């Protein structure tokens, strides 16, 4: 059996398995009408979205309910990412659910995790309770919704995962989202895929005009082509009750009555999610911040979302032959939008050829490469790129520029800077940064054998920076020698303008106390209910350190008279 046919058969059998699992119905995690700001597997930067982002009416503190019987098997609290996240295993189903960006947990779980935080003297923590420690029942309140971590607004991020920790589409498990709207297509593109191919005598990506016949039907302008081509779309879906542009569930290509391409977003693997950068036209995204989905398998694409493929989804257009093509865009509820495209096969001279800008640095994706440039050394391990390309490297007065912003990286590359030309008194303050808009993001400051070592997953302008300025600490809701009898919290603002906060610790009367970190607001907050303070004067000390080791210590006294 050919390898490609076997792969398709495995994927089809996997799809059947998912369909069978759909008999499992979970309770929705919020007792409000469910509207989405993000749906399953929609396209995000460097990854597919792994769940549903459920709107919470711009508020925090909504009760979050367990979707089924089970037990908490993981709790993770991070400054960024999922913020406060709860992971619940459901043995009766073989599945688990995830609840993220939470404000807090229920009292039992809250006491459990705070005990662990005090034991480890850390706010950021990850623990794996035993099954008997934190059992939950279906419909039990397990947490309260929030806005912690890297969320851009209050909402509940909700996932369902299988035993391999692969995210699954929650809508297939009883989480019903009203949707009577058809998918929308903004743009259609055709790509010549080799040097002898053209579309309308052009060898570069070409945009095809669309005419909207109805909400569910579009007609594309006719064109002529020759050779191997691929189709790309910029499209989205919308659900009822929300204006957000979310992802498509399924896309098909039917050419002359034969289905040549289909992908379905029911499941994916976290360790393959970054291959989204082969699924989209990444150079177009880097330039326009808009994603074109490539409806063929590009080089190095290892995604397992494809359920029907002929010639990897690529169309071979022959001379003097007509091709009648239908694209079918579907959402999970079965709403379909069709796009009709006619292509005439016509071999003709190419009048606009693809341009390749060559440089002295040719990078092969299957080979490692070391480049020495002035006081910098750049090391690319093999297989961190998806395609071979010419690296654009240019020197700058205070660093160097790697300007291939349209080339995605699958892993990090190593960048080393020799400190020999830096004054000895400045070396401990020196770091490598990458310019991002008006900011200089820290890339590395680890020093070894007179050199700085850093790592980056992005190209850009790399600058040698200096940071000798310690972080700032500012109390927000109290002053020195204040009476805090009627206070529930201590709030302080901590900030570092250069490399960022590495660590912080708070102490009352010499004893470590927990400060939660709201990094989006640069706040650390201590809850007085964590311990019973005696009457009288208490000493507060807060220590904050940045990534270069610059440290600030804040000291004050406060009183408890009750």
Image: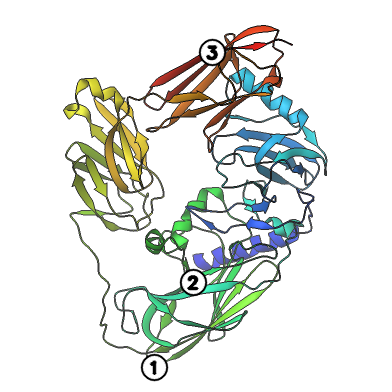
Outermost top residue: 536
Mark 3 burial class by Cα count in 10 Å: few <14, some 14-19, many 20+: some
Is residue 158 placed above or below 418 in the rendered structure? below
Q: Position of residue 275 (x, y in %)?
A: 47, 55
What secondary structure is marked by label 3? strand
What secondary structure is marked by label 2? strand
Q: Which dot, 2 or 1, sits closer to the camera?
A: 2
The residue nearer to you, when weighing 229 against 484, is 484
Q: Are marks 2 and 1 in contact (CB under 8 Å)?
A: no
Q: Quadrant of residue 85?
A: top right
> Which comes sooner in the sequence, label 2 or label 1?
2
Is residue 457 placed above or below 516 in the rendered structure? below
Q: Which residue is labeled 2 in the image?
A: 233
In the drawing, what numbered circle is on residue 320? 1
Q: Which residue is painted at 25% across and 47% down in the image?
A: 401
Mark 2 burial class by Cα count in 10 Å: few <14, some 14-19, many 20+: many
The reply to whether residue 175 is visible in this rendering is: yes
> Which comes sooner in the sequence, label 2 or label 3?
2
Q: Which dot, 2 or 3, sits closer to the camera?
A: 3
199 left or right of 396 in image: right
Q: Which residue is painted at 58% across and 19% down in the image?
A: 121
Q: Which residue is painted at 40% across and 63% down in the image?
A: 288
> Which comes sooner in the sequence, label 1 or label 3?
1
What secondary structure is marked by label 1? loop
Mark 1 burial class by Cα count in 10 Å: few <14, some 14-19, many 20+: few
Q: Which residue is labeled 3 in the image?
A: 556
Q: Are marks 1 and 3 in contact (CB under 8 Å)?
A: no
The residue nearer to you, when weighing 233 against 94, is 233
152 left or right of 74 in image: left
Q: Position of residue 344 (x, y in %)?
A: 42, 90
């Amino acid at each position: 059996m050919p390898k490609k046919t076997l792969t398709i058969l495995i994927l089809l059998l996997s799809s059947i398995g998912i369909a069978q699992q759909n008999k499992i119905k979970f309770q929705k995690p919020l007792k409000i009408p469910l509207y989405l700001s993000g749906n399953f597997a929609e396209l995000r930067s460097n990854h597919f979205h792994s769940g549903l982002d459920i709107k919470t009416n711009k508020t925090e503190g909504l009760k979050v309910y367990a979707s089924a019987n089970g037990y908490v098997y993981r709790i993770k609290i991070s400054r960024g990412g999922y913020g406060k996240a709860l992971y619940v295993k459901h043995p009766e189903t073989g599945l688990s659910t995830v609840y993220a960006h939470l404000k807090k947990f229920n009292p039992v779980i809250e006491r459990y995790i705070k005990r662990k935080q005090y034991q480890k003297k850390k706010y950021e923590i990850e623990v794996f309770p035993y099954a008997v420690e934190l059992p939950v029942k279906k419909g039990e309140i397990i947490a309260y919704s929030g806005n912690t971590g890297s969320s851009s607004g209050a909402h509940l991020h909700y996932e369902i995962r299988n035993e391999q920790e692969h995210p699954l589409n929650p809508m297939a498990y009883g989480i019903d989202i009203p949707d009577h709207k058809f998918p929308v297509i903004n743009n259609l593109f055709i790509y010549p895929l080799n040097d002898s191919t053209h579309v309308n005598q052009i060898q570069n990506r070409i945009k095809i005009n669309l005419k909207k016949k109805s909400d569910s039907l579009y007609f594309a302008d006719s064109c002529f082509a020759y050779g191997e081509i691929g189709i790309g779309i910029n499209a989205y879906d919308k659900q009822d009750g929300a204006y957000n542009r979310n992802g498509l569930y399924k896309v098909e290509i039917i050419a002359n009555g034969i289905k040549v391409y289909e992908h379905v977003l029911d499941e994916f693997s976290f360790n393959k999610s970054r291959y989204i950068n082969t699924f989209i036209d990444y150079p177009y995204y880097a330039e326009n911040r808009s994603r074109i989905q490539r409806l063929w398998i590009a080089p190095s694409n290892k995604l397992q979302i494809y359920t029907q493929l002929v010639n990897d989804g690529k169309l071979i257009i022959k001379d003097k032959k007509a091709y009648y093509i239908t694209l079918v865009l579907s959402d999970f509820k079965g709403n379909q939008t069709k796009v009709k495209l006619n292509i005439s096969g016509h071999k003709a001279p190419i009048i606009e050829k693809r341009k390749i800008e060559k440089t002295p640095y040719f990078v092969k994706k299957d080979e490692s490469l070391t480049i020495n440039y002035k006081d910098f050394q750049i090391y690319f391990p093999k297989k961190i790129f998806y395609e071979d390309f010419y690296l654009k490297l240019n020197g700058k007065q205070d660093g160097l520029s790697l300007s291939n912003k349209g080339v995605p990286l699958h892993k990090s590359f190593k960048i080393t800077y020799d400190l020999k030309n830096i004054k000895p008194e400045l070396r401990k303050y020196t770091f490598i940064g990458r310019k991002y808009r008006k900011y200089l993001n820290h890339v590395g400051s680890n020093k070894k054998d007179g050199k700085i070592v850093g790592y980056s997953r992005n190209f850009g302008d790399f600058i040698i920076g200096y940071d000798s300025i310690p972080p700032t600490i500012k109390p927000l809701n109290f002053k020195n020698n204040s009476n805090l009898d009627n206070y529930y919290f201590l709030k302080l603002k901590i900030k570092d303008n250069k490399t960022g906060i590495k660590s912080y610790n708070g102490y009352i009367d010499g004893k470590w106390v927990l400060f939660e970190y709201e990094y989006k607001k640069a706040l650390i907050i201590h809850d007085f209910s964590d311990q019973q303070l005696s009457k009288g004067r208490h000493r507060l000390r807060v220590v904050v350190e940045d990534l270069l080791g610059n440290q600030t210590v804040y000291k004050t006294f406060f009183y408890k008279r009750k």
